[in-house]
Image (cartoon, grey):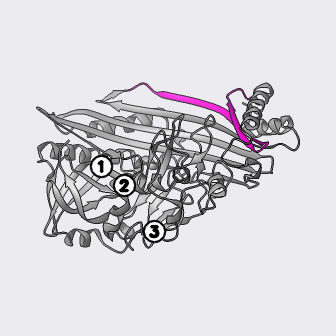
Amino acid sequence: MTTLESIAQRFQRIAPAGLRWSLRVVDTRTEQLAVRDDVVQPLNLEEDRGAMVTVFERGGSGYAASADLSDAGLTRALERARAWAQASGGRSVADFDQAPLAATRGEYASPLQTAWDAIPLTEKFDTLRAACAGLNVSEKIVDRHAWLWHTQRDALYVTSAGAHNRQHFEFVVPMLSATANAGAQTQTRTLGGMTHCGQGGWEIVASSGFTTAAQTVADEALQLLAAPDCPSGTMDLLAAPDQMVLQIHESIGHPLELDRILGDERNYAGTSFVTPDMFGRYQYGSALLNVTYDPTRPEQIASFAFDDEGLPATREYLIRDGILQRGLGGGTSQWRSGLPGVATARATNWNRPPMDRMSNLNVEPGASSLTDMIASVERGVLMRTNRSWSIDDSRNKFQFGCEFGQLIENGRLTQVVKNPNYRGISATFWRSLKAVGAADTFEVLGTPHCGKGEPNQVIDVGHAAPPCLFAAVDVFGGA
């Protein structure tokens, strides 16, 4: 098979001297395996390879993608990209002849303890069968699902300025789901709703709890089936790490994307309540809130050494002691806005252009034990695992629902409740943060499904957090 290096070398011979360009070649292989109700599902294998050419010329920028990686295919992509660049010159939001073009060089590889391909397919399905069978704890469990998803991706980014970044990624996403039913009541409990994803090999299957959590997942589905609805009212909210994933994602991550703040991202999923003048002074949360952008954590799903515009990844504070410091904007957005950003221009595949995305966006640990946080609550609820989400088109007002709730009364965890929900406003919600879990409560999680852009791009995002306690939240029950 033609290597990514040879494709890049041929393109460099084709590209005219003096032209400013970048080439991103991506080769992706995915494998999805599932067992549902003890029945092995069809094996899903996919392979995908292609290249994106970007050209800066006459003040404009243009790009074109192709799965035809022959000399003729690369030439056609280059010609289309040049035509778009020339057509957009003088009509763009900025003079792209002045846009930064990376000259970085380096390599990255996901950490591996046990290669995915080192495990025989029969053993993978045996693991799935055992997990699915472990969910079968009652005749009231009417649907059982065990699922594993592995992705291997090689990417090479080169530019006319001399960049040469080679990166190899391996992602594993495990999932367990049990649905319980009795009459008109149906409840589903999962293994964190896909949040236990990460970079690595077969070792993630064990570290995620996939091989040991089946009975707990099923038992909690049955508990929910028999539980009353979550009460409504103003009370404290203790959000578990797998719910913090969604809270961080929607009410910090998306609002801080610089392309939204600049007004580029409007049609598909709205803009942002954040404005450029807020950076360096805005009280985003209480003094306990510290949020980092950290693509250097090797086991987290969105780690890398370079983004898809060649910017080197570094750990940075987005929010420090509650004060907004910088946004989620790659080199192009930083250049356009004059605002500080991070290496976060990312594309979901070879046939999509990079845009400002979340990567690993984490709430740093605090100093509180889980026991102390619970003991401090007179009336509240612990919520685990996101189930539903709704947020307005400025990423401000939100309403989230969880799979599992448990009341906290007079400093003690008491009754399990079903259909727990809460609502708030991003601009004020984080200021109600009154306790943050210590390092021993911190969990490295994420999601493989963050959507943005037109055409849509779905990409992996890391979110790590401890449990966090919020005061006086609007909580309510009901499906």
Q: Secondary structure at mark 1?
A: strand
The image position of residue 196, as x and y in percent, is 40, 49
**What is the CA distance from the residue labelled 1 to the residue labelled 2?**
8 Å
Residue beneath disc 2:
247
Q: Residue at x 75, y 26 (%)?
A: 73
**What is the CA distance from the residue labelled 1 to the residue labelled 3?**
25 Å
The image position of residue 276, as x and y in percent, is 53, 61
Q: Residues within 10 Å of mark 1 (few under 14, many from 20)?
A: many
Q: Residues within 10 Å of mark 3 (few under 14, many from 20)?
A: some
Tag 1–tag 3 contact (CB < 8 Å): no
Precedes in sequence: disc 1 or disc 2: 2
Q: Secondary structure at mark 3?
A: loop
Please, which residue is most extreme toward the front here?
Answer: 90
* Residue 23 visible within the image: no
* Residue 409 visible within the image: yes
Magenta span includes 55: yes
Precedes in sequence: disc 3 or disc 2: 2
**What is the CA distance from the residue labelled 3 to the residue labelled 2?**
19 Å
Which quadrant of the view contains residue 362?
bottom left
Q: Residues within 10 Å of mark 2 (few under 14, many from 20)?
A: many
Tag 1–tag 2 contact (CB < 8 Å): yes
Residue beneath disc 3:
282
Highlighted range, magenta: 41-69
Front residue of 283/417: it is 283
The numbered dot on residue 400 is 1
Q: Amino acid at mark 1?
A: Phe
Front residue of 411/354: it is 354
Precedes in sequence: disc 1 or disc 3: 3
In the image: residue 424, left or right of residue 257: left
In this rendering, the answer to whether 329 lies above or below 191 is below
Q: Amino acid at mark 2?
A: Gln
Q: How many marks?
A: 3
